Amino acid sequence: MSGQDLSQPILRTSSRVMSLTTDPAAPQEPSLLREPQLAAWAGFRVGMSQAISIEMGKHHGEHAALAMILKGRTRGRIRSRGEECDFSPGPDSVGLFAPKFDISWKRWQCEPGAERFIVELDFADLHQAGDLEQMLASRRTLRQNVTLSDHQLASLMRLIAAEVRGGSPHGALYATSLSISLAAYLCAQHASGGRTPTRERGVLTAMQKQHVLELVQRRLHENLSLDELAAAAGASRFHFLRLFKNSFGMTPYQFVIDQRIAAARQLLEKTSRPLVDVAAATGFSSQSHMSTAMKRHTGLSPGHWRRSKPQ
């Protein structure tokens, strides 16, 4: 990096600072996220900023990272690992940067209102990821591609961005599940070297299912984490995700939402408790969150289930 001091963090995430740094002489992009939004997010470290036009800039990252333009159009010239190319990202364009990357930008032009979103792939953030972390760290290498077009990857990035921007209303379980899904997808589709992992065919034992179900029912009103669910089954996060989906045909987050909706319906039909109390008692982050979930899963609003209560 020509001896320049790239010690200034480009984006902050709560008490943690992303390793992605930028030339302090270059203009800094204003963050679009506030501290409470960053503190509520339990997945990979992220940053969202207003993309600005610059004549020249340099970035360095210790960890692999994904970057995409969420809104607006941008274009410029990018140089990384000895290769230089014109860059004009489309709606499904994602930049995938390998660990310890150095990139240079030239004549970067952004239309007003353009937004940039970055996910830093530090697998230490996924504590107890177990076999996923081992698979990524020891057997497979992410292939750098700064002009990647991948609709599914872009969709995952947008889901994460929307959740972070909204203050993580779906909780820690959803955040962690999204991050692990993102890591697993990258490993399967955009990594090289080593053996492609075979699909997990196992299922949870009857005892494991019972322990998980008891935990969910006992603490349905709380912000359950993937760590807690996996610990109840005695498995790593990633292994638990695969076993759970093989066993129930859905993700742990979807299962917990189903359980919350069922519990909320019972309260709506059998009690006169206010909707906001029903939402809190069944683990939804707000009355609005409960209403959205019930409409999406049942096609009916909480008000419908309340009106069906016997008089």
Image (cartoon, rainbow, N blue to C red):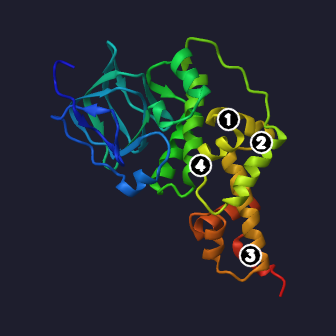
List the residue tagged with mark 2: 208
Q: Quadrant of the N terminus?
A: top left
* Label located before the other in sequence (3 or 1): 1
Query: Tags 1 and 4 in contact by the CB under 8 Å rule?
Result: no
Front one among 50 and 194: 194
Q: Is residue 82 left or right of residue 263?
A: left
In the rendered image, which quarter is residue 134 located in?
top right
Q: Position of residue 64 (x, y in %)?
A: 42, 27
List the residue tagged with mark 1: 235
Q: Quadrant of the C terminus?
A: bottom right
Q: Please, is residue 219 above or below residue 186 in the view?
A: below
Nearer to us: label 2 or label 3: 2
* Label located before the other in sequence (1 or 2): 2
Q: Amino acid at mark 4?
A: Ser
* Label located before the other in sequence (1 or 4): 4
List the residue tagged with mark 4: 225
Task: State the CA–CA distance, disc 4 to disc 2.
Answer: 17 Å
Nearer to us: label 4 or label 3: 4
Is disc 3 surrounded by few (<14), some (14 to 19) or many (20+) residues within 10 Å?
A: many
Front one among 151 and 235: 235
Q: Is residue 308 visible?
A: yes
Is disc 1 surrounded by few (<14), some (14 to 19) or many (20+) residues within 10 Å?
A: some
Query: Tags 4 and 3 in contact by the CB under 8 Å rule?
Result: no
Q: Position of residue 35 (x, y in %)?
A: 35, 54
Task: State the CA–CA distance, disc 3 to disc 1.
Answer: 35 Å
List the residue tagged with mark 3: 268
Residue drawn 80% across and 39% down? Answer: 247
Is disc 4 surrounded by few (<14), some (14 to 19) or many (20+) residues within 10 Å?
A: some
Q: Is residue 299 visible?
A: no
